[in-house]
Image (tube, rainbow, N blue to C red):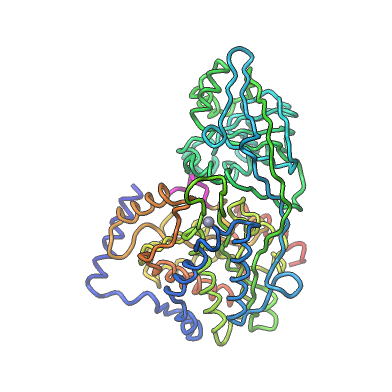
Amino acid sequence: MLKTTVAVVALCACLSMSAGTKPQGDESSSLPEAARAAMKNIDAEKIRATVKYLSDDKLEGRGTGQKGGDLAANWLADQFRAYGLQPAGDNGTFFQNVKFFGITTDQRKTHFRFVPKNGEEMALKFGDNFVATNESHTETAEIDAPIVFVGYGINAPEYKWDDYKGVDLTGKVVLMLVSEPPSDDPNFFKGKALTYYGRWTYKYEEAARRGAVAAILIHKTEMASYGWEVVRNSWGGESSYLQDEKGPKLKSAGWIQMETARRLAQAAGMDVDQMMKDALSRNFKPVELPVRLKETLVSKVRPFSSRNVVAKLAGSDAQLTKQAIFYTAHYDHLGIHRDEPGDNIYNGAADNATGCGILLELARAFAAAKPRPARSVFFAAVTAEEQGLLGSKYLGLHPPVPARDISLDLNFDDIQPFGEPEQLVVSGAERTDIYPEVEKAAKEFHMTIQPDDHPEAGHFYRSDHFSFARVGVPAFSVNEGALFKGHDLAWGEEKEREYVAKRYHQPSDEYKPEMDFTADAKLAKVGFALGWAVAGAPRLAGWQPGDEFEKARGASQARAGH
Ligand SMILES: [Zn+2]
């Protein structure tokens, strides 16, 4: 239904275009002259140059804590400096130092077996059947414990849902489904949309809080919304953890493939399809399987630091300059996987050299603005996004201005260079009180706002703006829909499908000369217009009443006596 509506709207837009009645996208008539003049600096070819440079093999896939990641950070700081921005990191530098533990599972020394009470044991193969990481930062973990199936592994009092039912999981292994109970009811796990409860990060956190030693997620593509390849590649290299993060940790946080789960259920005398059905009920209770996990998890533990790169343009108003808006984009990607044969550099051209290209153009354009907006504008290229939004998490917890004084964060992640987009995707913007500004910007750039095609994928919790939202700052990512000028919707959708299947989180996400960065320049301009408006608005932005993040906003402002 949704698709049909969009196609009709799109068709109308195309017709009016061909009739020549539509003005160019850059005019943005409601912006003041200073803003319009500054915005004109945004240049698609400069974004191309950034993407080409950052995704070159020389930068080795910009792995967090790897040489290539450090080179990228230095280079980004050099650009900010060249634009005349002020450093906003530690000790008068552009860098905010973030300390991590890097954990790499030693795939040869790691053994992972399911041992049923009766019948033959199953030895699994890393990568093919399972992946696992030790979150507790020790070099060796020995696990020999019973497996308990806990359904979705969710305890959500507001939805009257508790998969755990008070069962003691101390010292046990929990087996869980990815995602959350499916629903069309907006009052039950937000309907089709995924809440934070459906994210694997939540599931591991909750299992650890309950004293489990290990957690195993069952991967099912339709439920996870990404394929096994993505899990395998993301877990196949080094994973990072913030050093200053306290709280309980799992000795083994892993995934198994659907087929492996099927075999595990069989070994337990159970049926995986039935188990998944049982998990759909509020009355579900944890089930201990007559199967133990025997695992030796050997890891390389590497303490290291990586850096967020943070730059500032001071606001023009003596009072409001203490307040700020932020633009963010992660610069890290998956680095090199030295164990893998063939091309093992994960260049990350689309993900997220494109976002960095946009961030730099925003920085350059704002730096040239005369006069400047009233509030300060910060530009942050953050690290360790691919490790679980860790760089932005650190930035959100240690911002250069208090979170209560940050009006907005606009994030850019993976903006496909497919030409001129006619749809704007700003999921979560409707949860903030600046949505009318967003609608205005969309209109001025002749874009229709396209609702999230896949709310079930939980994109809102999977990109760096979430790190701002969780400390109360109104935040969302700016992205494009699938409709591009000169093409029908099916064309764009096919391009997206092809990207997800063939390049997303794979070494083939590389720069190609035929890439058309009009898309990225246009989204940079939309972001510019929006940021300009919010940076000069009379009031700080906020969340809609009752929103999940309103409480965090209120708490940060109460501390300041607002
Ligand atoms: Zn990304």
Residue positioned most to the front = 341
The answer to which quarter of the image holds residue 545 is bottom right
- Residue 150: tell me if it is visible: yes
Chain part drawn in magenta:
453-459
Q: 30 above or below 253?
A: below
The answer to which quarter of the image holds residue 218 is top right
Residue positioned most to the left = 19
Q: 357 above or below 245?
A: below
* Position of residue 494 in the picture relative to residue 224 (left or right): left
Residue 154: x percent and y percent?
62, 36
At 55% from the left and 65% from the top, the residue drawn is 410
Could you tell me how many numbered marks the image carries?
A: 0
Q: Quadrant of the C terminus?
A: bottom right
Q: Magenta span has 456?
A: yes
Residue 406: x percent and y percent?
65, 68
Residue 117: x percent and y percent?
64, 14
Residue 77: x percent and y percent?
62, 73
- Residue 426: tell me if it is visible: no
Q: Magenta span has 320?
A: no
Nearer to us in this view, 457 or 335: 335
* Position of residue 233 in the picture relative to residue 2 (left or right): right
Nearer to us in this view, 203 or 334: 334
Q: 102 above or below 292?
A: below
At 48% from the left and 66% from the top, the residue drawn is 51
* Position of residue 252 in the picture relative to residue 76 (left or right): right
